[in-house]
Image (cartoon, rainbow, N blue to C red):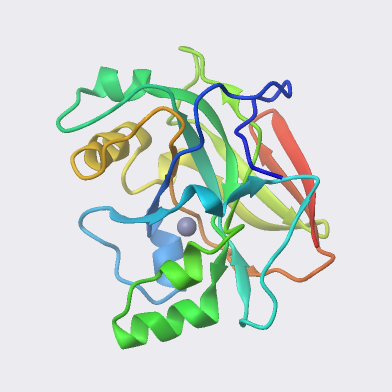
Amino acid sequence: MTYQHQWQDGTPVSWPVGKVVCVGRNYAAHARELGNAVPDAPILFLKPATALVPLGPDFAIPSGRGSCHHETEISLLIGSALTGQVSEAEARAAIAGITLGLDLTLRDVQNQLKQQGHPWEVAKAFDGAAPMGTFSPLSAATDLADLSFTLFVNGEARQQGHSADMITAIVPLLQFIATIFTLQPGDVVMTGTPEGVAALNAGDALVLTLGERSWMTRVR
Ligand code: ZN
């Protein structure tokens, strides 16, 4: 079935499904857990639209390609174009929806690619590499600096994050991205993962929470 972005009430998002812009190492503790330096500027990479799949009721991970890690990330649905130098207000206004997504990462493959100085796409941009929750419309009242989220795997809290701990906060991140990649309605921005990344296994039961919202899903 072809993926379509959905609102939390189950209605489809009218914009086409676009690219996913991701940021690496946006939480200092996660950069350290992987032995990476904390970067001076956001480290950006892309996943194609074909990486997107619904987060629930279940999703698949690749088999026979080493460990596949969960990276739980606040994910933003873009609702209006952002390109070049944009103001804070323009960047904020372009966020139409918010959810949690998983930046699935073939960690063993990624480590090999990094050692060889090669790009990461094979480890991060494969089909199904971005299971994405249903989006909540963003209201003017949403405080983007006060978003807490959690990933539970088989009942155990694996990742706990708070948007205040981002190295580059959401609005400046969008402003930076727009100077490199034009963001269009239907694109998604994944804002990086806190510490606690680990391998997923078939049969794992996941619960993700973002503020008052939660999603249950399972690894096929
Ligand atoms: Zn990530």
Q: On the rendered image, what quadrant is the C terminus found in?
A: bottom right
Q: 48 and 168: which one is in front?
A: 48
Q: Is residue 31 left or right of residue 215?
A: left
- How far across and down, in percent of the image, does residue 84 sit? 16, 33
Q: Residue furthest left?
A: 85
Residue under the point 45% across and 12% down: 140
The picture quadrant where one finds residue 45 is bottom left
- How far across and down, in percent of the image, does residue 181 sit? 26, 43
- How far across and down, in percent of the image, does residue 162 sit? 51, 42
Q: Residue furthest top?
A: 140
Q: Is residue 26 above or below residue 114?
A: above
Q: Is residue 84 above or below residue 124?
A: above
Residue under the point 61% across and 81% down: 65
Q: On the rendered image, what quadrant is the N terminus found in?
A: top right
Q: Is residue 79 left or right of residue 39?
A: right
Residue under the point 58% across and 60% down: 127
